[in-house]
Image (cartoon, rainbow, N blue to C red):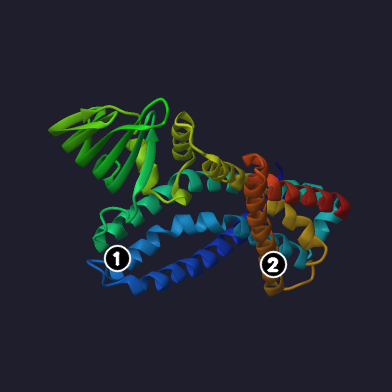
Amino acid sequence: MNRMDRYVITHVMELTGIVALGLVSIYTLVVFVSDVNEAGRGDYGVLQVLEYSLLMIPSSLYVLMPIVALLGTLMGIGALARTGELTAMRAAGVSLSRVGAAALLAGVGLAVFAFFLGDWLAPTSENLATEMRDSARGNGSPGKSIWLRDADQVVRINRLQSESHIGDVTMFKLGADGAMTATLTVQDGVYVDGHWHLSGVKRTDFAGDRTSVSSFDQLDFNGGISPKVLKQFILETGSLSASGLLRLIDYMDENHLDAAKYRLLLWRKLVEPITVIVMMLFAVPFVTTQLRDTGAGQKLLAGALVGIVFYVFNKVSVSLGDIYQWPAPLAAGLPTVVMGLLSWWRLARAN
């Protein structure tokens, strides 16, 4: 990396930072305004809405990262083209591919940051924001039942207070032929020392035409449903880390459940950093041909249009993959691959 590479990278990263600050500020304001109508429910006041909005900033930045990378590169390379610095570089023998390589290096740095943001910082801050909001509103648990399978048992949890505290639980034990052989109703359950400590338990066994009912004040239960699994159901799927998605997929595979949705989410999370790199690479020939002499407003508009088209293409690819049962890597990565090939082709032609 020589001085020219460092100059291009610095220029691109500076403009990318400015674009990120502007877009995230607008996005956070929208989140605040849309949530401020909920103020007044329980202890959820305006200050809590503001805290929630600020905690959602990492998630907002992660969602906007591809468009931020595209607009930042359009603005950064465009500024070099407008001031004649890019022309001077090319006159000195620097090819457009070399400028693209410098932008690619900046993209790698942003991609690493995007992965860290999406896999750790954004999920952590979003979980804190959700817990704070639910606690302030007085919502201790989700409003719908959770159905899980654990080997030969089907479990319904009506009250999930935390990943280690459940209540109003019904377990249905199945026989080899799929017929129900017993049910277990539980008032409350707490995960302690590697097993569930249940209280207020009533068991009903079915044997032919006869049933028998037994009650227990306390009962210990060992099973494959652990707090790590339950935690994934407390969180929104978009706020799960890659490791959390892997745990959820493993659990669903072990119990012969359909994990296609979560595999697709995992692959989209893995492809996202590559998308950031591709977006930055796409901007280089785009700005040195059609947008070389245009103003900042036109560059922003062009970048926004490209971002919208890519977003729609991404959604269509995911929907088609779901309909036609495409492999998760194909459904999640097709738009990025197409954009990458288009970027390489345009960059080769521009040289």
Q: Can residue 327 be seen in this view?
A: yes
Q: Is mark 2 on a helix, strand or loop?
A: helix
Quarter of the picture holding the N terminus:
top right
Mark 1 or mark 2, which has the lower sequence index? 1
Asked which secondary structure carries label 1, the reply is helix
Where is residue 12 drawn, in percent x and y? Answer: 65, 56
Residue 187 picture quarter: top left
- Residue at (49% x, 48% y) in the render: 117
Q: Is residue 336 left or right of residue 196?
A: right
Mark 2 — residue?
305
Q: Which residue is nearer to you in this view: 309 or 79?
A: 309
Q: In this view, does 214 lie to the left or right of 125?
A: left
Structural distance between the alpha carbons of marks 1 and 2: 35 Å
Q: Where is residue 312 in the image (x, y as percent from the top left)?
A: 66, 60
Give the amino acid type for the residue marked by disc 1 in the picture.
Gln
Image x and y of residue 275, in percent: 65, 49
The residue lying at 79 percent from left, 51 percent from top is 342
Residue type, numbered disc 2: Leu
Residue lying at the far top in this picture: please name it.
Answer: 176
Question: Taking 34 as reference, is 72 left or right?
Answer: right
**Residue at 43 percent of width and 48 percent of height:** 123
